[in-house]
Image: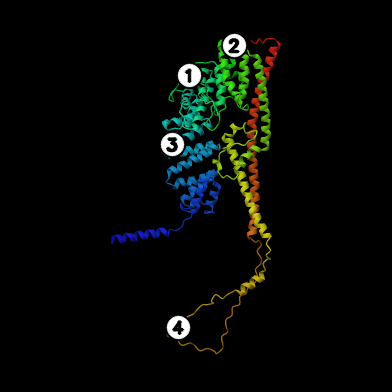
Amino acid sequence: MKHALALLMLGAALTADATDVYRAGAAEDPHVRVAEYLNRDGRHLSAIVELRLLDPTDAPQRMPEAYRWQLADSYLSFGMRDRAQAIYRDLERTSQDKLRLGRAQLQLAEFEYTRGYWAEARATLYRMRETLPQELVEDWQDLLARVLMAEKRYGDAAEVLTDLDNSERQSAYTRYNLGVALINDGRAPQGLTALDRIGRLVPSNLEELALRDRANLSLGWYFLQAQQGGTAKPLFERVRLEGPFSNRALLGLGWAELAPQGERVRKARIGDEPDTDASPFTTFSTLGVLLRPGFTEEDIFRRAGLSSFRLSKASKKEEQALAKALVPWVELISRDPMDTAVQEAWLAIPFTLDRLGAYTQALEYYEKAIEVLEEARRRMQAAKVSIRQGRMVETIVRREIESEAGWRWKLLDLPDAPETYFLQHLLAEHRFQEALKNYRDTRMLQRSLESWSQRLSAAEQAHAASDRPPGDAEALIRRAQRRWTPPWAGLEIVLRAESSLSVPVAHGDGAYAEPELRPRLRLAASPARFNGPVERARAAQQRLADLKRQLAAAAEAQSKLLQDMSLADLDRQQQQIERYLIEARFALARLYDRHQKGELDEE
């Protein structure tokens, strides 16, 4: 009996499950599942459209939680922060999934940080601090520190990274940023120690290897500018010979041989008191911006403490240092002459040869340096012309013009254009990347509108080409009358005798007339505006035309912004090339003048 009762209960449960009522927007809704797939495939706009089909009134707060999560994630992924933020705040009041809420808030703050909304990102991160899940503490620290460093609040950033005492769980990137924050906050010994640990780490992947090179390069140039050549040399030697930072390292290694060697710098711990006499180190940059330590506004021969040198016969010790400096520089000039470190090496070599008394070779190298710099200036001019034509940006977006990746889209390859090489550093910066994403999105939306416009035009053309005659209202009414059937047709009435009724009253013998239904129909006036498929297509075409104009204006604004940023960066690089040319020509003229005066007694 018990077994029979259990089977009955199980059957009832299965029947109840089988008859569950469909609820739009639930986790098992096909639209929600399709949107989840589209998001994973990077088609965030299509996911938004799929979800909005379930809620044409645009009231997500009335929909199930699964729908709201999916819609908010789609909005944020496509870059529509305000809509996503409104849904996330509503979910904070209703959802019990604190970990997912924390990850959503971190993604929102990451979007605000990359877009340059630093105050908003900081507010978002501080607001979630009280409910922050333990699993997200390190990610929260890293992002908040980057935001604070972008605002140049280095002391606050260092405090955020150290107040929880979790350095053993922090990533190498976070510890690198800690060193940068400490140095910029005036605590140079502690910051240098933190960066030195990064410079000695055993990398597990190519990214950590590049980070290690970057830390050593930054440390080397720091000590070089502090006239600590002896400390700088081993740091430059840690950098790979072939890598993104190798050219800057080779350049610095040569100058380190010529700079005053100084004393070894002691290491400090994070908890030590800051050195109030140390000047803030402002040449570091946070992750996401490539370092350019070879760039200064001063005379290149005064860099790294070289101002004490004079153009006179070098001592034996100085000759040895000069000969050692030539080794990395000779290797450096064999590389791409468009790199600024290579260009500087072309000037450093004849300077060194002049100090060694090899005046003929110095003249030859100065002449070659001028040729290299003139070629760089010519290519810079060609790059500016190409930028004004918009070729590089258009080539970049054309490759993925149909992509709906939104703000998560990344530039993975560069077009073969004259300006591409000179703008490598700019292309890696958030400000350029975000403007490029905006421009790419406008072009993608323009393509989508153009596709819909073509479909609507095809529908209108098909209607115009139809050979069907126009409808006749009178004929339609006559046909309707012929086909009209009385509503009582086929109705069967069953009669039964009723014995309890009274005797009917007598009446006249007049015959009853047969009932006749005479519907009084007349044509109604034609509607003022017919709203058929063709009319709706024409109205949609007008809306598309308005959207096209708005998108064209937005695309033009973003294109102009990208062009202005690119030209400004090229102008700055051209000014550097012009300074190098002035130095090279002045040095060459000086050598010729000394030669004419007979002062060059080359041995």
**What percent of the width, then of the height, locates residue 444?**
61, 45
Q: Nearer the viewer, mark 1 or mark 2?
A: 2
Query: Are dots 2 and 3 in contact, CB under 8 Å?
Result: no
Q: What residue is at 60 percent from the left and 74 percent from the top?
A: 483
Please tell me which of labels 1 and 2 falls first in the chain. 1
CA gap, disc 4 and disc 3: 87 Å
**What percent of the width, then of the height, locates residue 108?**
51, 41
Q: Nearer the viewer, mark 2 or mark 3?
A: 2
Q: Residues within 10 Å of mark 3 (few under 14, many from 20)?
A: some
Amino acid type shown at disc 2:
Ala
Q: Which mark is residue 137?
A: 3
Q: Residues within 10 Å of mark 4 (few under 14, many from 20)?
A: few
Q: Which residue is mark 2?
A: 314
CA gap, disc 2 and disc 3: 58 Å
Q: Is residue 164 visible?
A: no
Please tell me which of labels 1 and 4 falls first in the chain. 1
**What percent of the width, then of the height, locates residue 134?**
41, 38
Q: Which residue is mark 4?
A: 496
Amino acid type shown at disc 1:
Val
Number of marks present in the image shown: 4
Please tell me which of labels 4 and 3 falls first in the chain. 3
**What percent of the width, then of the height, locates residue 89?**
48, 45
Q: What residue is at 67 percent from the left and 65 percent from the top?
A: 468
Determine the secondary structure under disc 3.
helix
* Residue sitting nearer the eye, 501 or 318: 318
Please tell me which of labels 1 and 3 falls first in the chain. 3
Residue 602, placed above or below residue 450: above
Determine the secondary structure under disc 2.
loop
Query: Are dots 1 and 2 in contact, CB under 8 Å?
Result: no
Amino acid type shown at disc 4:
Arg
